[in-house]
Amino acid sequence: MHIDLLDHLRCPADHAECWLVAAIERMADRHVERGTLGCPVCRRSYEIQDFAACFATPAETVENRAHPTPDEVTRLAAMLDLRVPGGFVGLHREWAPYAIPLAFSFDVHCVVLDDRRSIRPAEGVSLLIVDTALPLARGVLRGIALGIGAPQHAVHRALRPGGRVVGAAGLDVPAGIALMARDVRSWVGERLPDATPVVSLARPR
Protein backbone atom coordinates (compact mmCIF):
# COMPACT_ATOMS: atom_id res chain seq x y z
CA MET A 1 0.00 0.00 0.00
CA HIS A 2 1.39 3.38 -1.01
CA ILE A 3 2.10 5.67 1.92
CA ASP A 4 0.16 8.54 0.29
CA LEU A 5 -3.05 6.54 0.79
CA LEU A 6 -2.66 6.41 4.59
CA ASP A 7 -4.15 9.87 5.18
CA HIS A 8 -7.27 8.87 3.24
CA LEU A 9 -8.08 5.64 5.10
CA ARG A 10 -10.88 5.55 7.65
CA CYS A 11 -12.14 2.96 10.13
CA PRO A 12 -15.00 1.02 8.47
CA ALA A 13 -16.73 0.29 11.81
CA ASP A 14 -20.19 1.75 12.48
CA HIS A 15 -19.28 5.03 14.15
CA ALA A 16 -18.41 8.58 13.13
CA GLU A 17 -15.76 8.74 10.42
CA CYS A 18 -12.34 8.49 12.00
CA TRP A 19 -8.78 8.55 10.68
CA LEU A 20 -6.43 5.69 11.48
CA VAL A 21 -3.10 5.68 13.29
CA ALA A 22 -0.37 3.80 11.43
CA ALA A 23 2.43 1.82 13.06
CA ILE A 24 4.78 0.93 10.19
CA GLU A 25 7.11 -2.02 10.60
CA ARG A 26 8.62 -2.30 7.14
CA MET A 27 8.71 -0.10 4.04
CA ALA A 28 9.85 -0.75 0.48
CA ASP A 29 10.45 2.58 -1.23
CA ARG A 30 7.18 4.46 -0.55
CA HIS A 31 5.08 1.33 -0.08
CA VAL A 32 4.13 -0.02 3.34
CA GLU A 33 4.94 -3.73 3.35
CA ARG A 34 3.95 -4.52 6.94
CA GLY A 35 2.36 -2.64 9.80
CA THR A 36 -0.83 -1.97 11.77
CA LEU A 37 -3.63 0.57 11.46
CA GLY A 38 -5.44 1.45 14.67
CA CYS A 39 -8.72 3.30 15.27
CA PRO A 40 -8.64 5.70 18.26
CA VAL A 41 -12.45 5.54 18.59
CA CYS A 42 -13.32 1.82 18.67
CA ARG A 43 -9.78 0.49 19.29
CA ARG A 44 -10.00 -1.92 16.36
CA SER A 45 -6.76 -2.68 14.56
CA TYR A 46 -6.16 -3.68 10.95
CA GLU A 47 -3.03 -5.39 9.68
CA ILE A 48 -0.95 -4.42 6.68
CA GLN A 49 0.48 -7.66 5.32
CA ASP A 50 2.50 -8.17 2.15
CA PHE A 51 1.72 -4.59 1.01
CA ALA A 52 -2.08 -4.98 1.42
CA ALA A 53 -4.18 -3.31 4.14
CA CYS A 54 -6.57 -5.95 5.49
CA PHE A 55 -9.97 -4.64 6.60
CA ALA A 56 -11.41 -8.16 6.25
CA THR A 57 -10.04 -11.69 6.42
CA PRO A 58 -8.42 -12.33 3.02
CA ALA A 59 -10.04 -15.03 0.94
CA GLU A 60 -7.91 -17.49 -0.99
CA THR A 61 -5.33 -15.80 -3.17
CA VAL A 62 -6.36 -15.78 -6.82
CA GLU A 63 -3.95 -15.03 -9.63
CA ASN A 64 -5.94 -12.96 -12.08
CA ARG A 65 -4.67 -13.84 -15.55
CA ALA A 66 -6.95 -11.45 -17.44
CA HIS A 67 -5.00 -8.83 -19.35
CA PRO A 68 -7.08 -5.98 -20.77
CA THR A 69 -6.13 -4.73 -24.20
CA PRO A 70 -4.96 -1.11 -24.66
CA ASP A 71 -8.36 -0.31 -26.21
CA GLU A 72 -10.16 -1.73 -23.16
CA VAL A 73 -7.97 0.33 -20.82
CA THR A 74 -8.63 3.48 -22.85
CA ARG A 75 -12.37 2.72 -22.81
CA LEU A 76 -12.42 2.45 -19.02
CA ALA A 77 -10.35 5.63 -18.67
CA ALA A 78 -12.83 7.48 -20.89
CA MET A 79 -15.80 6.26 -18.85
CA LEU A 80 -14.06 7.31 -15.64
CA ASP A 81 -13.16 10.68 -17.22
CA LEU A 82 -9.42 10.43 -16.56
CA ARG A 83 -8.43 13.22 -18.94
CA VAL A 84 -6.74 15.09 -16.09
CA PRO A 85 -4.02 13.19 -14.14
CA GLY A 86 -3.93 12.79 -10.37
CA GLY A 87 -6.27 11.59 -7.65
CA PHE A 88 -7.51 8.19 -6.53
CA VAL A 89 -9.60 5.74 -8.57
CA GLY A 90 -11.28 2.70 -7.02
CA LEU A 91 -11.30 -0.62 -8.90
CA HIS A 92 -13.40 -3.42 -7.48
CA ARG A 93 -12.40 -7.06 -7.95
CA GLU A 94 -12.89 -7.90 -11.64
CA TRP A 95 -11.41 -4.53 -12.66
CA ALA A 96 -8.15 -5.23 -10.79
CA PRO A 97 -6.18 -6.15 -13.98
CA TYR A 98 -6.76 -2.59 -15.22
CA ALA A 99 -4.94 -1.04 -12.25
CA ILE A 100 -1.34 -1.07 -13.48
CA PRO A 101 -2.03 0.05 -17.08
CA LEU A 102 -4.41 2.79 -15.84
CA ALA A 103 -1.87 4.06 -13.32
CA PHE A 104 0.95 3.98 -15.86
CA SER A 105 -0.92 5.48 -18.82
CA PHE A 106 -3.14 8.05 -17.08
CA ASP A 107 -1.09 9.00 -14.00
CA VAL A 108 -3.74 8.19 -11.37
CA HIS A 109 -3.47 6.15 -8.19
CA CYS A 110 -5.56 2.99 -8.48
CA VAL A 111 -6.97 1.55 -5.25
CA VAL A 112 -7.96 -2.08 -5.79
CA LEU A 113 -10.86 -3.11 -3.51
CA ASP A 114 -11.13 -6.87 -3.17
CA ASP A 115 -11.65 -9.63 -0.61
CA ARG A 116 -8.68 -11.57 -1.95
CA ARG A 117 -5.14 -10.94 -3.11
CA SER A 118 -5.93 -10.65 -6.79
CA ILE A 119 -3.06 -8.32 -7.71
CA ARG A 120 0.37 -7.36 -6.47
CA PRO A 121 0.62 -3.71 -5.46
CA ALA A 122 2.87 -1.68 -7.75
CA GLU A 123 3.81 1.93 -8.42
CA GLY A 124 0.55 3.86 -8.48
CA VAL A 125 -1.45 0.84 -7.24
CA SER A 126 -2.58 -0.05 -3.71
CA LEU A 127 -4.60 -3.05 -2.52
CA LEU A 128 -7.23 -2.95 0.24
CA ILE A 129 -8.75 -6.24 1.42
CA VAL A 130 -12.40 -5.33 2.08
CA ASP A 131 -15.82 -6.98 2.36
CA THR A 132 -18.96 -4.82 2.66
CA ALA A 133 -17.41 -1.49 3.68
CA LEU A 134 -15.08 0.97 2.00
CA PRO A 135 -12.45 2.18 4.50
CA LEU A 136 -11.97 5.47 2.65
CA ALA A 137 -12.49 9.10 3.58
CA ARG A 138 -15.56 10.90 2.33
CA GLY A 139 -15.18 12.05 -1.26
CA VAL A 140 -11.63 10.75 -1.73
CA LEU A 141 -12.31 8.87 -5.00
CA ARG A 142 -12.61 10.69 -8.32
CA GLY A 143 -14.05 7.57 -9.92
CA ILE A 144 -14.80 3.93 -9.21
CA ALA A 145 -15.42 0.79 -11.29
CA LEU A 146 -17.77 -1.70 -9.64
CA GLY A 147 -17.80 -5.46 -10.07
CA ILE A 148 -20.28 -8.13 -8.98
CA GLY A 149 -20.64 -8.06 -5.20
CA ALA A 150 -19.30 -4.53 -4.79
CA PRO A 151 -20.44 -2.64 -1.65
CA GLN A 152 -22.71 -0.29 -3.58
CA HIS A 153 -24.21 1.33 -0.47
CA ALA A 154 -20.80 2.84 0.36
CA VAL A 155 -20.07 4.27 -3.09
CA HIS A 156 -21.88 7.58 -2.59
CA ARG A 157 -19.84 8.45 0.51
CA ALA A 158 -16.39 7.59 -0.89
CA LEU A 159 -16.96 9.22 -4.30
CA ARG A 160 -16.64 12.98 -4.76
CA PRO A 161 -19.62 14.91 -6.24
CA GLY A 162 -19.44 14.69 -10.04
CA GLY A 163 -17.25 11.59 -9.83
CA ARG A 164 -17.81 8.78 -12.31
CA VAL A 165 -19.07 5.27 -11.56
CA VAL A 166 -18.66 2.39 -14.01
CA GLY A 167 -20.57 -0.83 -13.39
CA ALA A 168 -20.85 -4.23 -14.98
CA ALA A 169 -24.03 -4.65 -17.02
CA GLY A 170 -25.68 -6.89 -14.42
CA LEU A 171 -25.31 -4.37 -11.59
CA ASP A 172 -27.98 -1.93 -10.48
CA VAL A 173 -27.10 1.75 -10.49
CA PRO A 174 -26.49 2.80 -6.86
CA ALA A 175 -28.64 5.43 -5.19
CA GLY A 176 -27.40 8.97 -5.73
CA ILE A 177 -25.84 8.11 -9.11
CA ALA A 178 -27.28 9.56 -12.34
CA LEU A 179 -27.05 7.10 -15.25
CA MET A 180 -25.24 8.61 -18.26
CA ALA A 181 -24.92 5.72 -20.72
CA ARG A 182 -25.32 1.95 -20.93
CA ASP A 183 -24.43 -0.83 -23.35
CA VAL A 184 -24.40 -4.63 -23.21
CA ARG A 185 -21.11 -4.70 -21.30
CA SER A 186 -21.34 -1.93 -18.74
CA TRP A 187 -22.89 1.36 -17.72
CA VAL A 188 -21.48 4.71 -16.56
CA GLY A 189 -22.99 7.23 -14.17
CA GLU A 190 -22.11 10.37 -12.25
CA ARG A 191 -22.45 11.06 -8.54
CA LEU A 192 -25.08 13.69 -7.86
CA PRO A 193 -24.26 16.63 -5.57
CA ASP A 194 -25.39 16.38 -1.98
CA ALA A 195 -28.74 18.00 -1.33
CA THR A 196 -28.48 21.47 0.19
CA PRO A 197 -30.51 21.73 3.40
CA VAL A 198 -33.46 24.09 3.36
CA VAL A 199 -32.75 27.29 5.27
CA SER A 200 -35.69 29.08 6.84
CA LEU A 201 -35.71 32.83 6.26
CA ALA A 202 -37.58 35.24 8.52
CA ARG A 203 -38.45 38.80 7.59
CA PRO A 204 -37.16 41.23 10.21
CA ARG A 205 -39.92 43.05 12.11
Image (cartoon, rainbow, N blue to C red):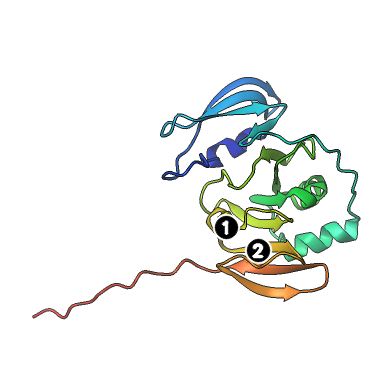
Where is 75 relative to 204, above or below? Answer: above
Quarter of the figure with the N terminus: top right
Left or right of 161, for residue 56: right
Residue 150, image x, y percentages: 67, 53
Report the front residue among 176 and 132: 132
The answer to whether any part of residue 102 appears in the image is no
**At 50% across and 34% down in the image, what residue appears?**
20
SS under mark 1: helix
Query: Pointer 1: residues within 10 angstroms few (<14), some, or many (20+)?
Result: few
Picture disc at residue 164: 2
Quarter of the figure with the C terminus: bottom left
Query: Of all residues shown, which one is farthest toward the left?
Result: 205
Where is 24 relative to 175, above or below? Answer: above
Report the front residue among 45 and 188: 45
Query: Pointer 2: residues within 10 angstroms few (<14), some, or many (20+)?
Result: many
Query: Of all residues shown, which one is farthest toward the top?
Result: 25
Query: At label 2, which amino acid type do we have?
Result: Arg
Q: Which residue is mark 1?
A: 153
Residue 121, image x, y percentages: 75, 36
SS under mark 2: strand
Q: Are marks 2 and 1 in contact (CB under 8 Å)?
A: no
Report the front residue among 179 and 42: 42
Query: At label 1, which amino acid type do we have?
Result: His
Left or right of 178, for residue 205: left
**At 68% across and 74% down in the image, what residue appears?**
180
